[in-house]
Amino acid sequence: GAAGVGHYLNDWTDVDQDAKVGKDNGAKAHSTPKRWMILIGLTALAILPWLLYFTVSKSLVENEGTFSGSNVLLLVALHLAAFALYSVPPVRLKEKGVWGMLLDALYAHAIPSLVVVSFFGITDMMLLSILFAWQFFVGIRHIGFHQIQDIEKDKSAGVSTFAITANSEKIFQLLVWVVLPLELICFVLFAILSGFYWLLLVYLVFVGWRYILSRAWEISSEKKERSMQLTGAFVSNF
């Protein structure tokens, strides 16, 4: 539901820009009334199941020291609001430089992770803070590499992203040498504090697998641009 809202709202507000570069757009063929119907339906799917669950289980009553249903519903509301702030004019933070990256990281990773753990009643603020930081850095890494990879398409469509307005190579270095290490530190802390030590092994196996795949490509020292692309693909996917 929530993911559908974000995806469709982004398509709706990108119809004209996507048409310039021939990019597929899920809202292009829909009339305005139909777009509203679809958006309202997706929003209902994002909210109603939570309302139903917490109403039936009577979890909307705040309990001291615990996350109640109202906390989860507040996070869901913030999640949906973030989609609107990211895509819809005149705010449209998607095209407001670094603010677009920060908000993308929040709605795509950080807020959903809090929704999940809040639902299960996790109340350790240290653990929640580390989880939030970990997922936030994951989100920054993902949107950062996505913007770098889409620079030419975004320029053609007239979209002004942070990767376009700033130095893309410096952003790349920042993601690899600052954001990624911070993400890994937060992940290790989360695995240790939560007691899920097996996550460390799984993560190491996955990182090794991604590294082997990336090194399977022959990278010559003369092809700096290709090397940067492969390194970006590797870092972005693990």
Image (cartoon, grey):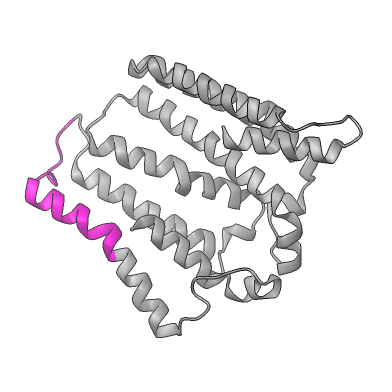
| Residue at x-position 33% and y-position 47% | 75
Residue 39 highlighted magenta (yes or no): no
**Direction from residue 170 to residue 82 in the image, left or right:** left
Q: Quadrant of residue 32?
A: bottom left
Residue 131: x and y in percent read 41, 29
**Direction from residue 234 to residue 86 in the image, left or right:** left
Quarter of the image where the N terminus is located: bottom left
* 16 to 136, vertically: above or below: below
* 24 to 138, vertically: above or below: below
Q: Quadrant of residue 177?
A: top right
Closest to the observer: 63 or 184? 184
Residue 211: x and y in percent read 64, 26
Residue 144: x and y in percent read 64, 44
Quarter of the image where the C terminus is located: top right
Instruction: Please report the bounds of the magenta region as a residue range.
Output: 44-64
* 204 to 91, vertically: above or below: above
Residue 77: x and y in percent read 33, 55
* 149 to 175, vertically: above or below: below
| Residue at x-position 75% and y-position 40% | 229
